[in-house]
Amino acid sequence: MSMRPYQRGLAMVFTGIVFLSFDGLLVRLAGTDGWTIVFWRGVFMFCALGLVSCLGNRLATLRSHPVASLASAVLLGLISGLFVLAIMHASVANVVVILSSAPLFAALFSRLFLHERVPYRTVIAIAACMVGMLLVFMGSETGGMLSGNLYALAAAAAVGGNLTLLRRYPTIDRIPLIAGGGILAAVVALPMASPLALGGHSYGVLALMGLVQMPLATVLINNATRYLPSAEVALFYLVETVLGTLWVWWLLGEAPSTASLLGGSVIIMALLVHAWLGLRREGHNVLNYEGSTQ
């Protein structure tokens, strides 16, 4: 039984976000400075997806929309770099909480530039998730983390902008964009990085991050914009707020507060209700369409 478009989009973005949620943990485990992480992660992502980009007719879609393709690659590079720098200057919980503001940016950009109506259920879900985000934030230590918080906020804006751009140009192949974003981030980071001064453990973690985790996460999330509005795709970044905090809690002992756990529960419930309403709406649309054709 084949999945309907909305179901396919939900499956893609949820799976992608689960992969992405390990990002903060892997950055911590890499055990080196932020610029070196940005460099190697970008190089590995380019190696993983660069050859794939040359297969078939993938690069032709970029030539059809050169400005949009370049803008998306730049935004992807910014997201990668800003996230790593945020993790290096603030707690993982803080960063993923602030990153959860991406749906607000996506909804705003979609309305301003695509004139795309944001469904009331999405607006309500965003509002509920923001309440959850505030609860998580209340349980986090924020002192001395201003620069990390600002990096995370800039990353959230870039996420919202990129998802909106990809929603506007659904025919652009995502894989070359991700490869291009990786190499752009690596080039920018190289002057500040120390790429040859790492131990074997660090190279192993960075290879896992750049060759497997980030390519899979980014490809799935960016392709989900073919089936879902950008605000809905960005809404699932709120799942990373919960999962990203849980991974570092379980594996590194960074225990979240009761407020963080309560806020995470609010976010998960809001997303479940939102997804259920979306699936129900699509089911009604399918039934109405089939009824009209009989």
Image: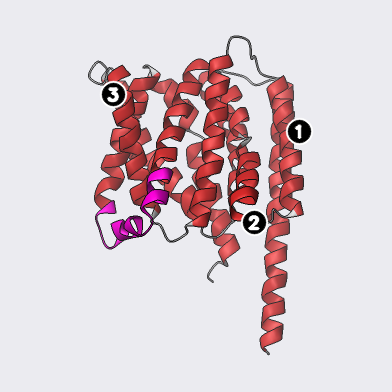
Q: Residue 209, image x and y in percent?
A: 37, 34
Q: Nearer the viewer, residue 134 or 123?
A: 123
Q: Is residue 201 left or right of residue 95?
A: left
Q: Quadrant of the C terminus?
A: bottom right
Q: Which mark is residue 116?
A: 2
Q: Is residue 282 left or right of residue 167?
A: right
Frontmost of labels 3 and 1 is 3
Q: Quadrant of residue 287?
A: bottom right
Residue at figure coordinates x 54%, y 49% from the top left? 164
Which residues lie in the magenta part? 53-71
Residue at figure coordinates x 48%, y 33% from the top left? 22
Q: Which residue is mark 1?
A: 131
Q: Nearer the viewer, residue 115 or 52?
A: 115
Amino acid type, label 3 = Leu
Q: Which mark is residue 190?
A: 3
Frontmost of labels 3 and 2 is 2
Q: Is residue 62 left or right of residue 244?
A: left
Number of dots carrying numbers = 3
Is 67 within the magenta?
yes
Q: Residue 131, image x and y in percent?
A: 76, 33
Note whether residue 288 is visible. yes
Give the class, few, some or many, for how many residues have Cα within 10 Å of label 1's Cα (few <14, many ≥20).
some
Q: Quadrant of residue 218?
A: top left
Q: Residue 16, image x and y in percent?
A: 49, 46
Does the magenta stretch mainly form a helix, a strand or a loop?
Answer: helix
Q: Earlier in the sequence, mark 3 or mark 2?
A: 2
Report helix, strand or loop for mark 1.
helix
Disc 3 from disc 1: Cα separation: 39 Å
